[in-house]
Image: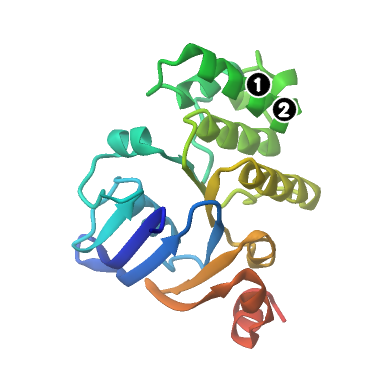
């Protein structure tokens, strides 16, 4: 049984169809990437999984449970957290308070403390900046904080939406090495990323979305080697 399974999902914004019969699966322990150009439906897929929008048809199952019509707060409690595109931090709050906000559904104090330690080990910069106001962090530090906040929910599935967007190349390397580390520690990852090269390099499997349709799927290495993917997304 897959940890996450979307089957035949159609989603609309008003009358505009954003997803057409999308079927994807994520097995426990995998990194799965969704790649595609702007407007392909990648973020809409994440919004559908997280309950921020509901599909017109099709189903979403998580950990053996149908969550197609489930609300966002329940979905977080079930074990899905997201680091959203644009980071969406609480800019006037301290770094440490932003992290605590990631654990708002939890009341296991010892567990929260140990997860905070885990985040600080993964992101030593956040430990240095823990009393700093989040809005004054650099772009790379804000991305680390968004990922750290998502980890504080202790998710079974962590969804990352464009984690490398707007970052310098050296920081992109850092972010993707941390994605690998998070996965190695046992967290399943669904990654939406414009940087197809990096996404496919880190992914066990990947799906290519075009105008709301899955047009290709395979292992990360298979898609890296695919001529169509190279021409369309890797600039070759």
SS type, badge 2 = helix
> On residue 117, which mark appears?
1
Q: Quadrant of residue 1?
A: bottom left
> On residue 121, which mark appears?
2
Residue 182 in view here: yes
Question: Is 129 located above or below residue 147 in the figure?
Answer: above
Residue 94 in view here: no
In this view, the residue farthest toward the right is: 170
Q: How many dots with numbers? A: 2
Residue 20: percent from left, percent from top: 30, 73
SS type, badge 1 = helix
**Residue located 61% across and 31% down the image:** 145
**Residue located 57% across and 58% down the image:** 193
Question: Is 21 located above or below residue 104 in the figure?
Answer: below
Q: 72 or 153, which is in the foreground?
A: 153
Left/right of residue 217 with respect to residue 47 in the rendered view: right
**Residue located 55% across and 61% down the image:** 33
Residue 77: percent from left, percent from top: 35, 32
- Alpha-carbon neighbours of circle 2 within 10 Å: few (<14), some, or many (≥20)? few
């Amino acid at each position: 049984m897959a940890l996450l399974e979307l089957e035949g999902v159609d989603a609309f914004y008003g009358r505009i169809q954003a997803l057409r019969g999308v079927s994807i699966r994520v097995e426990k322990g995998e990194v799965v990437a969704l790649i595609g150009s702007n407007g392909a439906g990648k973020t809409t897929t994440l919004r559908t999984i997280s309950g921020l929008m509901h599909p017109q048809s099709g189903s979403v199952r998580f950990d053996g449970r149908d969550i197609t019509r489930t609300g966002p707060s329940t979905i977080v409690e079930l074990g899905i957290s997201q680091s959203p595109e644009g980071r969406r931090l609480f800019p006037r709050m301290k770094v440490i308070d932003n992290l605590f906000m990631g654990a708002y559904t939890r009341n296991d104090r010892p567990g929260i403390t140990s997860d905070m330690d885990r985040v600080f080990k993964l992101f030593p910069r956040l430990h240095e900046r823990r009393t700093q106001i989040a809005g004054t962090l650099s772009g790379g530090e804000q991305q680390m904080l968004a990922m750290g906040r998502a980890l504080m929910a202790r998710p079974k599935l962590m969804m990352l939406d464009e984690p490398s967007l707007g970052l310098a190349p050296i920081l992109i390397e850092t972010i993707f090495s941390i994605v690998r580390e998070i996965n190695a520690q046992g967290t399943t990852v669904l990654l939406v990323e414009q940087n197809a090269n990096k996404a496919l390099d880190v992914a066990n499997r990947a799906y290519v979305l075009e105008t709301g349709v899955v047009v290709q799927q395979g292992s990360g290495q298979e898609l890296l080697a695919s001529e169509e993917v190279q021409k369309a997304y890797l600039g070759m």
